[in-house]
Amino acid sequence: MAKKLRSRAADYAVFAVVRAIVAVVQMLPPRAAYALADFLAWLAYTLIKKRRTVALENVRSAFPGIADAEADQLVRDMYQHFLRATVELMMLPRKLHGETFRKHFVLPGGPDFLPVL
């Protein structure tokens, strides 16, 4: 099988688009970022029919007696959960860093267990 050639320019273009999306998400307040995630989930569900069909087939295979409406809602919820988790990962570096991690974590050895980063 022949190796597929990759375009360096296309790789950089994809990187630039993804980085721009991450920058926008990081600028948004959490409520707006989650609203954006919900919109993107709806958009992905609506526009990417092939993936939606595969997801629905998988749900029906996993739950043979499930009603069509329930399967559809489960797939919609899956898209929403995935996009919200992705947005949370994008926001994480802004919210959690060396100065704030102690506010979010309780360490088993007490507050002096780890040195300040």
Image (cartoon, rainbow, N blue to C red):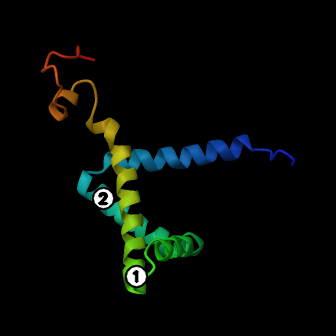
Query: Can I make out residue 100 in this image?
Result: no
Residue at 46% over, 73% down: 59
Amino acid of disc 2: Tyr
Position of 20 relative to 72 (above/below): above
Mark 2 or 1, nearer chain start:
2
Q: Quadrant of residue 8?
A: top right
Residue at 42% over, 79% down: 72
Q: Position of residue 110 (x, y in %)?
A: 12, 21
Query: Can I make out residue 116 in this image?
Result: yes
Q: Is the residue marked by circle 1 packed among few (<14), some (14-19), or many (20+) residues within 10 Å?
A: few
Residue marked by disc 1: 66
Q: Position of residue 103 (x, y in %)?
A: 15, 32
Q: Secondary structure at mark 1?
A: loop
Between disc 2 and disc 1, the foreground one is 1
Residue marked by disc 2: 34
Q: Position of residue 113 (x, y in %)?
A: 19, 16
Left or right, 98 with respect to 40, comes to left
Check the image and name the residue furthest to the right.
2
Mark 2 vs mark 1, CA separation in Å = 29 Å
Q: Is the residue marked by circle 2 packed among few (<14), some (14-19), or many (20+) residues within 10 Å?
A: many
Task: From the viewer's side, name the closer residue of 91 and 1.
Answer: 1
Q: Are marks 2 and 1 in contact (CB under 8 Å)?
A: no
Position of 85 relative to 55 (above/below): above
Q: Position of residue 91 (x, y in %)?
A: 33, 44
Position of 105 relative to 112 (above/below): below
Amino acid of disc 1: Ile
Residue at 38% over, 85% down: 69
The disc at residue 55 is none
Task: From the viewer's side, name the closer residue of 22 and 54.
Answer: 54
Residue at 49% over, 44% down: 19
Q: Which of the image's four quarters has the C terminus? A: top left
Position of 90 relative to 98 (above/below): below
